[in-house]
Image: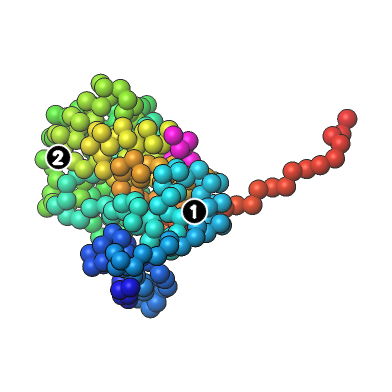
Amino acid sequence: MRLKLYRAADTAEAMAQVRAELGADALILSSRRVQGGVEVTAALEPDDDPVAPPAPDPHRMAAFAWHGVPAGLVRRLEAGPLPFALSATLRFEKLALRDSAPPLLVIGPPGAGKTLTVARLAARLVMAGAAPLVITADGQRAGAPEQLAAFTRLLDLQLLVASTPASLARALARREGGAPVLIDSPGTDPFDPAQRDEIAALAGSAGAKLAVVLPAGLDVGEATDLAGAYAACGARLLAATRLDLARRIGAVLAAGGAGLALAEAGIGPGAADGLVPMTPDLLATRLMRVPQLPAARTGARPI
């Protein structure tokens, strides 16, 4: 057995080191937090010295069942430190919001939280010293531009309205110095060919990267279908909203398993601190936090 100790700033970086040196068949034997990051012990078994995989953790299996994690993912997450199992099974990706990065077009079904997600990302950039260009392409929903404008005024940013591919291209011409660009969009049905074409036209005119916003508490099957349909439109990133409200979050893993990289997590109501990068550690902690259900009341009902 070949053993190796890895130190990294976070779980995702440590997992990348393990994969690069030991490959996808490496076993994670232990992990612990140390000053400055994490420390991981990994092993690789020679082909002629097979070992039985570790037995599944019953508590983890019960948590997965409660959350409704798809069976195909459960089999890949049942053993080893959960953050590393998640890193090996799903893709986690940070949003590219640096200067000169492609514009980020935020898409999703109606009511998913797209506008608030754009506002939160804009607040993050402003707090980091950047001045993003914020555009809304949502000219369909009554009051949509006004809602986002209320946030941009607080951030001392100008909001541009561009509801067609041609007007969006003109709005992007006002980008200065490679500033980050955030584009809100109308709610769409990715199963409707006409609405898929609208997404493609907006993305094409902006040269944008697509991020899907989905609520964490969706039905697992619905989340799988939606994520797959948006991935077919060219989306590669997921912002999961309402993790603070959803009791069961199997939909987040289902969306990740359907082809979207997990990028952002909505964890609270605040515009400045309610959205954080999705990490394997955050998702593992949330998965294992199974609330206690209230005990059923007994006794006769009053007449």
Q: Is residue 198 visible?
A: yes
Q: Identify the residue at the far front of this view.
A: 48
- Above or below residue 250? Residue 43 is below
**For this view, does 190 lie left or right of residue 171?**
right
Q: Which residue is mark 2?
A: 207
> Magenta residues?
215-221
Residue under numbered circle 1 = 287
Q: Label 2, label 1: how many angstroms apart (C-alpha)?
A: 36 Å
Looking at the image, is mark 2 or mark 1 earlier in the sequence? 2
Amino acid under disc 2:
Gly
Q: Nearer the viewer, residue 116 or 242?
A: 242
Does residue 269 appear in this view?
no
- Tell me how many marks there are: 2
Residue 220 in picture, x, y percent from top left: 45, 38
**87 lies left or right of 218:** left
Quadrant in the picture for the N terminus: bottom left
At 23% across and 56% down in the image, what residue appears? 130
Question: Residue 32: where, in percent of width, then height?
Answer: 42, 73
Q: Is residue 274 magenta?
A: no
